[in-house]
Amino acid sequence: GEDVEQSLFLSVREGDSSVINCTYTDSSSTYLYWYKQEPGAGLQLLTYIFSNMDMKQDQRLTVLLNKKDKHLSLRIADTQTGDSAIYFCADQNRDDKIIFGKGTRLHILP
Amino acid sequence: NAGVTQTPKFRVLKTGQSMTLLCAQDMNHEYMYWYRQDPGMGLRLIHYSVGEGTTAKGEVPDGYNVSRLKKQNFLLGLESAAPSQTSVYFCASSYAGGLGYTFGSGTRLTVV
């Protein structure tokens, strides 16, 4: 079946860039998403990219999509303590079904 | 501008007790979902609904039942709670063909 894989942990120093990577297996993706979950809260849609795009930039966030390799990444520039959270990669297929990765916990070092 | 509201936010149950979790959305979304989140397991889909009066099984449906009698509400029931059902439960909703899901803030359930 379809799967989304991402590493479970990432530590980054405050002020550096964070890069969270994700791979997926679905060949009929329409949209790919990054969700952010802060402690004790639900998932919030952070950004998304349409499957025929290869890059999207939104302020400190840059999403890169390599459709050939089925690889998605999220870069957070100038990482702040408020960026500490779990980041979920997700893939939506033509049936509108969304498959979530297990989430990457981003830890910010002072 | 409530979005997706889950009640209750916290609950402790004894093994064998029953309870119902309520999810309400005010965005006129057709689709609604129930997930559970456990450490290291990510989000696992329990049941979902593609419209009023319809429900379908997800990845981990055993021990749960659902109902969608009104478009805006999706209820998740535990008939006889077990410690393995200790988890954080999230409800989500979306438009058919829409962009992403809107999530509630979760219900933390402990079964002792």
Image (cartoon, rainbow, N blue to C red):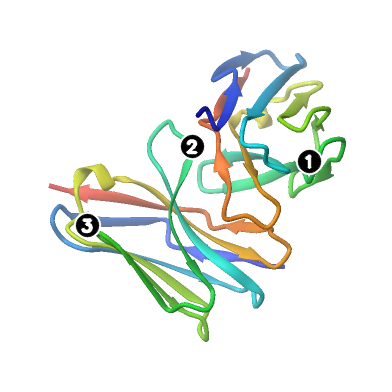
Q: Which disc, if any, is residue B61?
A: 1
> Are the residues flagged by discs 3 and 2 from a single subunit?
yes
Between marks 3 and 1, how big is the CA–CA gap?
38 Å
Q: Nearer the viewer, residue A77 or B10?
A: A77
Residue B21 x/y as whole percent: 68, 23
Q: Amino acid at mark 2?
A: Gly
Q: Nearer the viewer, residue B76 or A96?
A: A96
Residue contact between numbered discs 1 and 2, judged by CB atoms under 8 Å: no
Pick whichever of labels 3 and 2 is earlier in the sequence.
3
Residue B69 x/y as whole percent: 83, 28
> Mark 3 falls within which chain?
A
The kind of secondary structure element at disc 3 is strand
| Disc 1: CA contacts within 10 A as few (<14), some (14-19) or many (>=20) | some
Q: Amino acid at mark 1?
A: Pro
Q: Which disc, if any, is residue A42?
A: 2
Q: Nearer the viewer, residue A89 or A12?
A: A89
Residue contact between numbered discs 3 and 2, judged by CB atoms under 8 Å: no
Between marks 3 and 2, how big is the CA–CA gap?
23 Å
Residue A20 placement: quadrant: bottom left
